[in-house]
Amino acid sequence: MNQRGLSEEKVLSLLRSARLRDIPYERVLSSMCTKPHPVAVKAHMQFIESNLGDFGLFSGTKELEEKVIRLMGSLLGCEGACGYITTGGTESNIQALRTARNLVNKKHPNVVVPSSAHFSFDKIADLLGIEVRKADLDGEFKVDAGSVESLIDDSTIALVGVAGSTEFGQIDPVDELADIALSRDLFLHVDAAFGGFVIPFLDKKYDFDFSVRGVTSITSDPHKMGMSTIPAGGLLFRDETCLSPLEIDTPYLTIRAQHSLTGTRSGAAAAAAYAVMMHLGKDGYKKIIKRCMELTDRLVEGVEEFGIHPLIEPVMNIVSLPVPDLEGMRRELRQRGWYTSITRSPRAMRLIVMPHLSDEALEAFITDFGECLKNLR
Ligand SMILES: *Cc1c(COP(=O)(O)O)cnc(C)c1O
């Protein structure tokens, strides 16, 4: 650190040059995050100093957080859901399984997740000392309920279903998982980090949330398709008894106890999530999702003209394309400014059609995709 501080002007110019090295979202088809809605940004700025880790000092912000949880609960089939705004899907998944682990007393606990589960479950295995068993997927990349059942034993504490898988955007048969969970008295967590703000707004209806009896907890992230600012994840439980295993005494704060994994945490993110949900309403989200799905359809139509067919018909705004010479294709597209991603098994190009993508950008991508394909063939 310098002995003498720099002028604000100098510091801001350092920031500007760093920011210029960041990639603008315009040509990013690899990210599940997007430009936050302007109203979320305004709310975030207004609550920038608010700390929900010590919410006795910030009761106004705390009330907003509680309202956000109620809004999300009603969107996810349970008005009375409880929970809190986390730093994201990873923290939500950690905390859900920490609750599941602490609710029962097993010596060597294990959980059964689909093999499509997000890598946060590998962190969970390490952090919580839980064995994570990965169940097979069916031909459409949904978890196979038979495979889940075969992995359950006396030490199983929870099942996990994914609603909007990170790689394929697929929705597991949550009703089937719920039947298994109910019959075996297991905790059932649904990871809808991405899908939580997509599935409720699709034309087709899916049973994936608290409306399915047997679902205990849900992860759904405002900072992905919720259009809110980072860091905003959501962790919801069907009932209060699930929060108590997370409770820690906080002797020197204005509050008696804390349930969050982090101590100091952003009130700005909760205010931003509240602002954008109130501002958009269901109609607003529906419009955003509809547009993303129209662009997704157009993307599929475009690449099909080049003889490339997606691995599954997109369920949400995620497309997986088996392309010849995947790494070559990605390199060529990267040279034209496009950021793409991959799926692991089978290996394919993974594209996420987020709200930041314009119609023009999509058409330009389809054209570039076709040219790169021709060059490599
Ligand atoms: C993105 C994602 C996560 C992780 O969320 P972070 O906010 O990155 O921690 C977990 N699960 C699924 C299904 C995801 O898509």
Image (cartoon, rainbow, N blue to C red):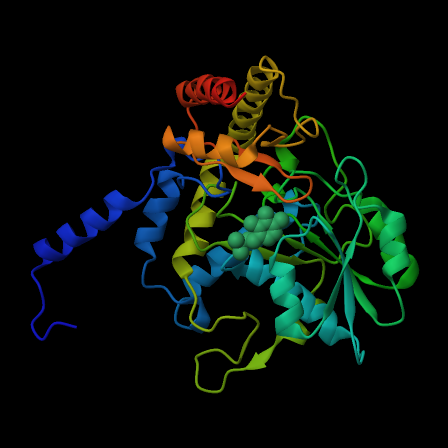
- Residue 47 appears left or right of 198: left
Residue in the image at 81% along x and 40% along y: 138
Residue 6: give x, y in percent of width and height: 8, 63
Residue 244: give x, y in percent of width and height: 67, 74
Residue 149: give x, y in percent of width and height: 89, 55
Q: Quadrant of the C terminus?
A: top right
- 297, 198: nearer the viewer: 297
Residue 126 image-quadrant placement: bottom right
Residue in the image at 78% along x and 68% along y: 110
- Residue 172 appears left or right of 228: right
- Residue 232 appears left or right of 166: left
Q: Residue furthest top?
A: 305
Residue 227: give x, y in percent of width and height: 46, 41
Residue 25 image-quadrant placement: top left
Residue 220 seen from this side? no
- 215, 142: nearer the viewer: 142
Residue 340 seen from this side? yes
- Residue 336 appears left or right of 316: left
- 204, 145: nearer the viewer: 145
Q: Quadrant of the N terminus?
A: bottom left
- 157, 68: nearer the viewer: 157
Please tell me whether residue 377 is drawn above or below residue 83 in the rendered image: above
Residue in the image at 48% along x and 19% along y: 366
Q: Residue furthest bottom?
A: 251
Residue in the image at 90% along x and 62% along y: 184
